[in-house]
C-alpha cells in the first residue's frame, strides 16, 4: 500500500464529528482499495506516485494576508472562499442572494445536518478512490440549499486558494429545489507544490436548473484530484462547463445521473496543456430513466510533452427508452511528443434510443498558419488565433458572458505560453 494512503487511513480513524457515520463507512471501503498503478484501468495513464514523493502539511487556520481572488469585470457574483481546504469567512462575501441558505459544515444547524447526512456521498459513486479519501478527510465544506421556486440571478463563486506545501480536502453539497435556478462556479488556481482533493455533489430537483462551471486552472507543481457529481430529476436541466489546465497531476471525475424523466444535460469541456503537464478527465453519464438528453463536447489542445487522458462513458439503462445522447472528443496536438489517450464509450441496453460518439486527434493546420503569416500576422499571434478558433465554440456556449470574457483573456495568456513545434516538426499523422 502507498505510504501516503496508509497515513490517510490512520488520520481518518481519528476524525470525529457529526459526519462520523459517513466517514466510517467510507473508511471501511477505503481500507479495501489498492493504490493505483499501471495495471489499474482507471489510472492506467496517470501515475500517482508523485503524491507519495511529496511532503505536505495539514492546513492551518491562519488567514493568508496575500490571499486574493481574481476580479472579474461586470460579473454579478458572491464569493465563497476556501483557504487551504477550510471555509474562510474573512475573505468571503457577506451579502448573499435571497432564498439561498449557505453555511459551513462547522456552523450547520440540526436541520441542515439532517439533509446533509442524507446527501453526503449519495450522488458521488463510491468507486472513486480519492472521493473516498475526501469523504474521510474533508476538514470543511459548504452546504448550499436553494429554496423551491427561487431564481438566483447572482453567481456563486466558490474560490479555492492554496498555500505552498499544504494538503487540503474540501467538499460542497448543493441542493437546487423544485423549480429553482442557480449558477455556481468552482475555481482552482495555484502553481506551487500542494495537494488538494475537492469534490462537489449536486441534487437538481424537478423542473430545476443548474448553470455550473469548474475552472481547474492549477498548473506547475500543484497536485489536484477532484470531482463533480450531479443527480437530475424530472424535467431538470444542467449546463456545465469544465476548463482544465495541466499540472504535475490534475484529475477530474464527473458523474451525471439522469434519475428522472425528460432531464437535460449539456457538458462542455476545454483543456490546454503544455510542458510535461498531465490532465485526466473521466466522465460517466448514467441514463436510468426515459426521455433524457445528454450532449457532451470535449476539446483539447496539447503542446510540448504534455499528456491528456479522457475516458467518457455513456450508459443507457434498459428502461431509458427515447434517450438522446451524444459524446464528441476532439484534440489538437502541437507537438509530436504530445500525447492523447482518448476512450469514448457507449453502453446501451435500451432499443429505442439515438446515440453517437467519436474522437479525433489532429495537428495544427500548417497551411492556415503559413497563410496568416503571409498576411503579416506574427507566428505567435497566428498560433493563438488558430488555437482559439478550435475551442471558441465551446466558450461561446457559456451562458454567463462576463465569465466568458474573463476566460478568453485567461486562454489568450495560456496560448501565448504554449510551445508549438515548427511546421517541419509538426505531427504528420492524425
Image (tube, rainbow, N blue to C red):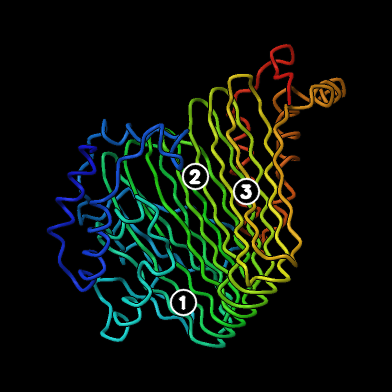
Label 3 sits on a secondary structure element that is strand
Please tell me whether mark 2 or mark 1 is closer to you in this view.
1
363 vs 257: above or below: above
Q: Which residue is mark 3?
A: 345
Count of picture labels:
3
Q: Residues within 10 Å of mark 3 (few under 14, many from 20)?
A: some
Q: Which residue is mark 2?
A: 217
378 vs 35: above or below: above
Q: Position of residue 167 (x, y in %)?
A: 27, 46
Pointer 2 or 3: first along the chain: 2
Which residue is nearer to you in this view: 66 or 30?
30
Q: Position of residue 72 (x, y in %)?
A: 55, 56
Q: Position of residue 174 (x, y in %)?
A: 44, 72
Which residue is nearer to you in this view: 77 or 182?
182
Q: In the rendered structure, are the residues bearing label 1 and label 3 in contact, judged by CB atoms less than 8 Å apart?
A: no
Pointer 2 or 1: first along the chain: 1
Q: Position of residue 288 (x, y in %)?
A: 58, 70
Q: Which residue is mark 1?
A: 175
Which residue is nearer to you in this view: 61 or 207?
207
Furthest residue toward top: 424
158 vs 177: above or below: above
Quadrant of the image occupied by residue 403: bottom right
Pointer 1 or 3: first along the chain: 1
Amino acid at each position: 500500500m502507498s505510504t501516503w494512503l496508509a497515513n490517510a487511513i490512520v488520520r481518518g480513524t481519528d476524525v470525529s464529528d457529526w459526519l462520523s457515520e459517513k466517514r466510517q463507512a467510507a473508511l471501511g471501503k477505503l481500507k479495501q482499495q489498492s493504490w493505483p498503478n499501471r495495471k489499474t484501468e482507471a489510472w492506467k495513464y496517470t501515475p500517482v506516485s508523485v503524491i507519495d514523493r511529496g511532503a505536505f502539511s495539514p492546513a492551518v487556520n491562519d488567514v493568508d494576508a496575500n490571499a486574493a481572488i481574481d476580479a472579474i469585470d461586470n460579473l454579478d457574483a458572491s464569493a465563497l472562499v476556501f483557504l487551504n481546504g477550510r471555509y474562510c469567512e474573512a475573505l468571503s462575501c457577506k451579502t448573499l442572494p435571497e432564498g439561498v441558505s449557505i453555511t459551513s459544515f462547522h456552523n450547520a444547524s440540526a436541520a441542515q445536518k439532517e439533509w446533509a447526512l442524507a446527501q453526503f456521498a449519495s450522488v458521488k459513486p463510491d468507486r472513486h478512490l480519492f472521493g473516498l479519501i475526501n469523504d474521510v478527510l474533508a476538514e470543511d465544506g459548504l452546504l448550499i440549499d436553494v429554496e423551491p421556486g427561487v431564481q438566483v440571478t447572482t453567481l456563486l463563486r466558490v474560490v479555492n486558494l492554496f498555500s505552498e506545501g499544504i494538503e487540503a480536502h474540501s467538499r460542497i453539497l448543493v441542493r437546487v429545489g423544485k423549480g429553482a435556478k442557480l449558477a455556481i462556479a468552482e475555481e482552482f488556481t495555484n502553481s506551487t507544490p500542494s495537494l488538494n482533493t475537492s469534490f462537489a455533489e449536486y441534487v437538481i430537483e424537478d423542473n430545476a436548473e443548474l448553470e455550473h462551471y469548474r475552472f481547474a486552472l492549477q498548473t506547475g507543481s500543484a497536485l489536484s484530484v477532484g470531482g463533480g457529481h450531479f443527480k437530475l430529476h424530472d424535467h431538470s436541466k444542467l449546463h456545465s462547463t469544465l476548463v482544465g489546465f495541466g499540472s504535475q497531476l490534475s484529475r477530474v471525475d464527473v458523474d451525471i445521473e439522469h434519475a428522472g424523466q425528460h432531464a437535460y444535460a449539456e457538458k462542455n469541456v476545454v483543456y490546454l496543456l503544455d510542458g510535461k503537464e498531465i490532465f485526466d478527465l473521466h466522465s460517466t453519464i448514467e441514463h436510468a430513466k426515459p426521455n433524457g438528453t445528454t450532449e457532451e463536447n470535449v476539446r483539447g489542445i496539447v503542446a510540448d510533452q504534455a499528456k491528456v487522458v479522457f475516458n467518457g462513458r455513456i450508459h443507457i439503462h434498459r428502461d431509458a427508452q427515447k434517450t438522446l445522447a451524444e459524446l464528441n472528443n476532439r484534440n489538437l496536438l502541437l507537438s509530436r511528443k504530445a500525447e492523447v489517450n482518448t476512450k469514448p464509450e457507449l453502453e446501451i441496453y435500451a432499443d429505442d434510443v439515438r446515440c453517437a460518439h467519436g474522437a479525433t486527434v489532429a495537428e495544427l493546420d500548417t497551411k492556415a498558419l503559413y497563410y496568416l503569416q503571409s498576411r503579416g500576422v506574427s507566428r505567435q499571434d497566428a498560433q493563438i488565433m488558430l488555437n482559439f478558433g478550435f475551442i471558441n465554440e465551446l466558450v461561446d456556449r457559456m451562458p454567463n458572458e462576463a465569465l466568458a470574457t474573463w476566460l478568453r483573456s485567461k486562454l489568450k495568456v495560456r496560448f501565448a505560453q504554449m510551445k508549438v513545434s515548427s511546421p517541419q516538426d509538426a505531427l504528420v499523422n492524425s
